[in-house]
Amino acid sequence: MLVVMNKKATQEEIDAVVAAIEARGYTARPIPGGDRVSIGILNNKGPVDASVVLGLPGVKDAIPVTKPYKLVSREIQPEGTIVRVGDVPIGNGYLVIIAGPCAIESRNQALTIAGHVKSAGAHIFRGGAFKPRTSPYSFQGLGEEGLKILAEVRETTGMPVVTEVMDFEHFDMVEEYADMVQIGTRNMQNFSLLRRAGKSSKPVLLKRGMAATIEEFLMAAEYILEGGNSNVVLCERGVRTFSHHSRNTLDLSAIPVVRKESHLPIIVDPSHAAGRRDQVIPLSRAAIAADAHGLMVEVHHAPEKAMSDGAQSLYPHQFEILCRQVRAIYDIFNMKQV
Ligand code: PEP
Ligand code: MN
């Protein structure tokens, strides 16, 4: 349930409503809005009796929240969230482009690619230091050395950096170096990792599990918000289907559904969806036309030598084309709707 306070409700009235909710054994979560405060009621097993709050001073209305997810839902927060990564905004009114290699392989590799993607117009640099690989014999990433290289990329180029955290024990380390912490597909339902992300002061990029429904995806984000971190960006990266013409099937319909259901920004990773370079630009164009708030794209200056995901990595000149085309599409729609 969402308790909507009057515009002129005082702090004392808000505190009294919170106390009344908590006295019933529920959790109360005040949510500041543009001109009024709302209070979410969480941890209720069944429907909440509105009379618990309706008669209290300062209360305007009590609205049942019909979805299993609450804090991420538009019912609780009608206006879209803007997440700031360093000084880069992600959300309505902005088109964010995140780019970089699949994995940080060396200082030279990272700085070379960062130079290319920055001049093409990328806002945020990506690169894995801890890589979730199908085979234990494949390159697993440089670990902390990779994180240090990412920090150097930020210092040299001014771009904030996003990188994946794969497990609970490395969270503190990744959080220290990264401007945004990525939780990958394979960990979308790693609940201890999600809870840890909820305690983080850094924004989180949460990728959709490869067989997750939208409801499961939003419930995973709910864990992070419930923990106290509302700076979450969702990322559609393709789901597993019967098709073999691409590595995964990009679920474009996830974009309008998420935008309808949630106030959190949603971006698209066409690279891991496609698994092959020739599909990345068309899927990127489609994602922006379908209202995604941005893209995360793998780029490598020498993809044939890449230690992971070379086949899907764009050459820098292709990335330049991608940036130009998606910006043109974004401008046509000039999407500013909430
Ligand atoms: C990645 O973005 O580096 C990655 C491994 O992607 P995903 O978790 O979507 O497979
Ligand atoms: Mn990759």
Image (spheres, grey):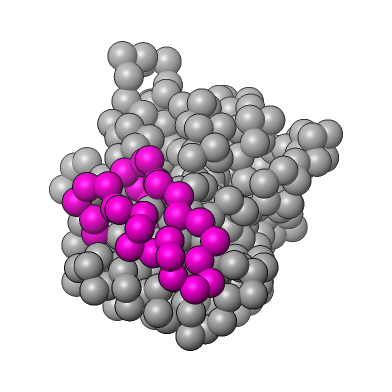
Question: Residue 61 lies in magenta, yes or no?
Answer: yes
Q: Residue furthest bottom?
A: 12
Closer to the camera in the image, 177 or 113 = 177
- Closest to the observer, 189 or 112: 189
Task: Determine the residue located farthest toward the left in the rendered image.
Answer: 136
Inspect the magenta stretch and tell me whether residue 281 lies in it: no
Q: Magenta part mainly helix, strand or loop? A: loop
Magenta part of the chain: 43-71
Question: What's the residue at 55%, 45% (across, down)?
Answer: 267
Observer-nearest residue: 63 or 83?
Answer: 63
Counting every numbered tag in the picture gives: 0
Return the x and y of residue 318 as percentages of the image width and height.
67, 37
Taking the image as shown, residue 101 lies to the left or right of residue 314, namely: left
The x, y position of residue 250, in whole percent, is: 46, 27
Which residue does the image show at 36% across and 15% down from the upper left? 244
Residue 193 image-quadrant placement: bottom left
Work out whether 45 lies above or below 141. above
Question: Residue 17, can we see it?
Answer: yes
- Residue 305 drawn above or below residue 8: above
